[in-house]
Structure formats: C-alpha cells, structure tokens
Image (cartoon, helix red, strand yellow):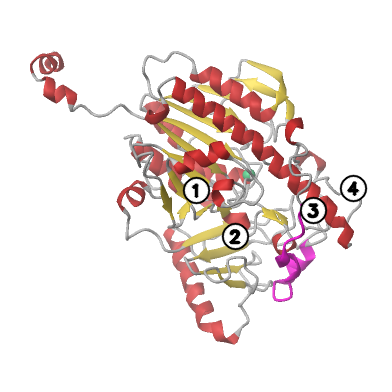
C-alpha cells in the first residue's frame, strides 16, 4: 500500500527507482589463446564479431588464469577461489555441491539462469548442476560433430551438427523463452578451440596457404630447465603426436613441421565458427532490444602453448599458457562509444565478484578475487601488482612438474617443488616479461639478477599468503618425472 501511495503521489521518486538489473551472457571458450583474435593483433585470424564486443566494451589485455587447466580454471571462474580452496585441482573432480558460485547467487536473487555446452567438471556426469534453472551438457569433452547432450536431465539426444552451432541454436531457443521481465544469466560453454581440432567444413582450408613454422623459442632451450627439453618428444611436446596430427612420432626432423602447421591451421579454423556464433547472439540480443541491458562476457578458461619453448598444451607458467582472453561489453560499465583497454593484471577469480557487483547482487564471502568494476570505471591505484600461479603435477599427464610461480608487471619467477617438502630438483625460471615477453632468456642463474631472484622468492611467499598458502600447508603430489608414455585413450 505504501508503495502504491508513493507511486501515486511521488512520481519523481518512482522515476529514481533502481535501474533494471542487467542480463548476463557469458561466452566461455576452451583453450583459446589470448592472441587468437584479430582484436589482439593476430596476423591471420579474422574475428569481426568478437572484436566488436571489445571495440564497444572493455578489452582486458592482461588477463590470466590462476591454474592453466580446464576444470580448475572453470571452478575458479564460478567461485572466485584458487584451486587449492575450491578443491577442483585436476580435470576429474566435480565442482563441490556445497560450494557457492556466482550463478547460484544470481539464481537466488531472482535471475533466470542457464548453462548450455561444455561444463567439464566431473568427467562422467552430464546431469544438471546447482545454480541453473536450465542445464544442457554432455559427458567428457564432447565431440565437434554430433554430440550426445543431456537436455536438462530430461532426456539424452545426439544433436546432429557442428558443436559450436548446436550450442548456439540451443542458446537462442532458451533466450527466446518468455520470462516476465526477469533478468537472466546464460552461460555458453564452447568446445572450441579445444583439441582434437576439427573445423567445420567451410573453414577447413581457410588457412591452407599460411606457413606456420615452429616459433623461435622452441630452439632456445639451453638455459631452460631440463624437464622442458624432456617434454619435447612427449604428448605435450612439438615432436610428439600433436593431438593426432602426427601419426608417426616422435619426429624431430625439419620436414615434420608440416604436422604442426596442419594442427595450428585446424585450431584457428575452429575459432572462426565461434566468431559466427557471437555474431548470431549479438544480432538476436539487438533484435530483442536486450543488447544494451546485457553484460556480454567473452573469455577463455586457459591459454595454450603453440610451439613456444617446444611445447604444446598448457599447465606451465609460461605466458601463452597462463594468458587468457577477456572482453566485456556492457554500456553500464563503459559506453559503447568509449571502449577501454585495461592493462592491469586481472584473474579468473575476479570474474565472479565483478559480475555480482555489476548485477547489484550480494557478494561472495571469503573469496580470493576482486571486482574490477572500479578499476574499469575510474582506475584503481590499489589494484594488485603481483599474484600467484599454481599447478599440481598429474599422474595422468606426466609432462609438467608442480609449478609455483609469481608474476609481477615486470618479472616472473617460477619454481617446481618436488612435493616432499625437500629441496627443488628442477631448475627454476626467471624472466623479465617487460623486455622479454616471449621468455627467451631464463635469467635464473645469471649472477647479475641474484638480487631479483631473492626479491621474487619473497614475492612468491607474499602472493601465496594472500590466498592462504604457506610452504607448510601447500599440498601437492610427488613429482614422478616427465614420462614418454601417452595418456590413457579415454581422457585425451
Ligand atoms: Ca580449457
């Protein structure tokens, strides 16, 4: 009654009521490199639709994952927590049922919420997860063609067609549903551009004329730890099988670069379909008059090495592995004619608090991430200058040791503890990423930088403390070494 009276007699107050809560369209790609986009200066890829989001919004040029592995990183995006705290430390662990997430908070705040596509936390489970009113996923990695989806726990169906377009169709269908003006959150989990790379037919030959040599850093391994040279001939090295693109391996002959070339062209090809998908969703939101009331997030869960340091895959603390793409279009954050590029270091764990703040929803308590709303809007002198990167050795993928690294705006220091609390058995790495962004020279044993090493070792302890870790409570597996054997067929 009071509200009615206010409405009748004080129209000016009614006009000042809080703005409509924004919708959120969250587009998550799998293993897309930070530079695999024309907006980021890629020499061959043309991605006009994704670029447009950045040209009308915010391009976070220094965005990182805190663990470069699919499931741990996805759990960090949802929870705002580092992997040791959310517990999803490998690709076979389910997101804990009792753990909060930003979709759960939004659902409780009255959002209509949906997840469509690759979820990838809990390998064999395709059932709906908490926090979503509508949930469509599949077991394991899914396939580029004709994946069997579980449609909201009601039925399983092989949906014919190319994965990227199938999830876009399902997303469009969900977006068109009536929802009485309720705000919505839609998360789309793309399979692309994850291995094994299969572009749709129309993009199979797009890059056929582009020569793709091994990068120079593949041959600059003399000052790098021995495990990096050992990795060269494995599942995660450039002389290995290259996710089935090389049939006879290992092969370190110069002619075998043709397999690397074919693999890379296919990786790029899968991204073109994602760009088409973004174009379709952009058009639909505009048609429905929802575009400018929607926070559109486009990001990848982790990066991937494409030959750098002789590596394929991710997991390590090197730049192509830890850097991710992150673009946000929302006129409520920055007007479309005033796009911004943010150079401060933002992390996967910052996504949940940022989206909740932008949506005016309650914050998650006790998390590690910070909202970048103020950073984007007006700048934030107190924004982080350094942060912890960590990865735990996996028996199923024995090609990367334990990693504990700290990255500032100028330096990166990375060590590999054995896991028994004793002395490290691998050489550490120190890079000046300001002047050597490609990490060509490992300065760890250079006497001139001994002071920097000591400083970065202290910085690592500080960065660990900020997320509740000390050398004493930091648990990790024993390093059983780099292995030549291939991973189990089922989990590739
Ligand atoms: Ca991934």
Along the horizontal axis of the image, is 357 left or right of 207?
Answer: left
Along the horizontal axis of the image, is 123 left or right of 263?
Answer: left
SS at circle 3: loop
Image spot of residue 165 (x, y percent): 65, 26
Q: Residue at x 87, y 56 (%)?
A: 256
For the record, the magenta segment spans: 211-231
Q: Residue at x 65, y 58 (%)?
A: 477
- Identify the mark at residue 247; answer none if there is no mark: 4
Can residue 321 be found in the magenta stretch?
no
Nearest to the observer: residue 26 or residue 66: 26
Q: CA distance from mark 1 to mark 2?
A: 15 Å
**Circle 2/circle 3 CB separation < 8 Å:** no
- Identify the mark at residue 319; answer none if there is no mark: 2
Q: CA distance from mark 3 to mark 1?
A: 27 Å
Pick whichever of labels 1 and 2 is earlier in the sequence: 2
- Identify the mark at residue 348; answer none if there is no mark: 1
**Circle 3/circle 1 CB separation < 8 Å:** no
- Residue 405 lies, with reference to residue 171, above or below; the image says below
Q: Residue furthest left?
A: 9
* Residue 89 visible in the snapshot: yes
Pick whichever of labels 4 and 3 is earlier in the sequence: 3
SS at circle 4: loop
* Residue 200 visible in the snapshot: no
The residue carrying mark 3 is: 235
Q: Residue at x 64, y 52 (%)?
A: 43
Q: Nearer the viewer, mark 1 or mark 4?
A: 4
Classify mark 1: residues with Cα within 10 Å, few (<14), some (14-19) or many (20+): many
SS at circle 1: helix
Image spot of residue 100 (x, y percent): 45, 37
């Amino acid at each position: 009654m009071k509200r009615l009276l206010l409405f009748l007699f004080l129209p000016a107050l009614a006009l000042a009521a809080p703005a409509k809560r924004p919708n959120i369209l969250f587009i998550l790609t799998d293993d897309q490199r930070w530079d695999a986009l024309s907006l980021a200066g890629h020499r061959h890829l043309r991605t006009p639709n994704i670029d447009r989001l950045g040209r009308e919004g915010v391009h976070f040029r220094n965005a990182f994952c805190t663990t470069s592995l699919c499931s741990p990183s996805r759990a960090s995006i949802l929870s705002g927590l580092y992997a040791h705290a959310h517990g999803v430390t490998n690709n076979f662990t389910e997101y804990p049922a009792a753990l909060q997430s930003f979709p759960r908070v939004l659902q409780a705040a009255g959002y209509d919420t949906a997840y469509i596509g690759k979820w990838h936390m809990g390998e064999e489970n395709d059932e709906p997860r908490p926090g979503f009113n509508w949930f469509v996923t599949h077991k394991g990695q899914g396939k580029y063609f004709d994946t069997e989806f579980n449609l909201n726990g009601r039925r399983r169906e092989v949906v014919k067609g190319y994965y990227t377009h199938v999830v876009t169709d399902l997303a469009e269908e969900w977006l068109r549903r009536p929802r009485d003006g309720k705000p919505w959150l839609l998360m789309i989990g793309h399979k692309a551009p994850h291995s094994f790379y299969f572009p749709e037919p129309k993009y199979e030959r797009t890059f056929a004329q582009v020569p793709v040599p091994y990068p120079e850093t593949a041959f600059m391994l003399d000052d790098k730890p021995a495990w990096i040279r050992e990795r060269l001939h494995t599942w995660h090295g450039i002389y290995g099988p290259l996710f089935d693109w090389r049939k006879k391996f290992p092969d370190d002959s110069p002619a075998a670069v043709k397999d690397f070339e074919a693999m890379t062209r296919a990786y790029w090809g899968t991204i073109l379909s994602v760009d088409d998908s973004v174009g379709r969703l952009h058009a639909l939101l505009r048609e429905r008059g929802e575009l400018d009331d929607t926070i559109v997030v486009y990001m990848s869960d982790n990066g991937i090495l494409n030959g750098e340091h002789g590596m394929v895959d991710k997991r390590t603390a090197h730049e192509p592995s830890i850097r991710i793409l992150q673009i946000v279009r929302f006129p409520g954050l920055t007007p479309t004619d005033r796009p911004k590029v943010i150079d401060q270091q933002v992390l996967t764990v910052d996504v949940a608090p940022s989206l909740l703040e932008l949506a005016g929803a309650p914050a998650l308590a006790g998390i590690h991430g910070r909202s970048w709303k103020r950073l984007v809007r007006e700048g934030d002198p107190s924004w982080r200058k350094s942060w912890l990167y960590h990865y735990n050795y996996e028996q199923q993928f024995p090609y990367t040791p334990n990693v504990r690294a700290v990255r500032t705006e100028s330096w990166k220091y990375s060590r590999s503890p054995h896991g028994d609390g004793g002395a490290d058995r691998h050489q550490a790495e120190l890079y000046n990423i300001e002047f050597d962004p490609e990490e060509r020279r490992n300065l760890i044993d250079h006497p001139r930088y001994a002071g920097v090493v000591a400083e970065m070792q202290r910085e690592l302890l500080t960065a660990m403390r900020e997320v509740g870790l000390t050398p004493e409570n930091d648990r990790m597996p024993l390093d059983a070494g780099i292995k030549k054997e291939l991973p189990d067929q089922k989990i590739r």
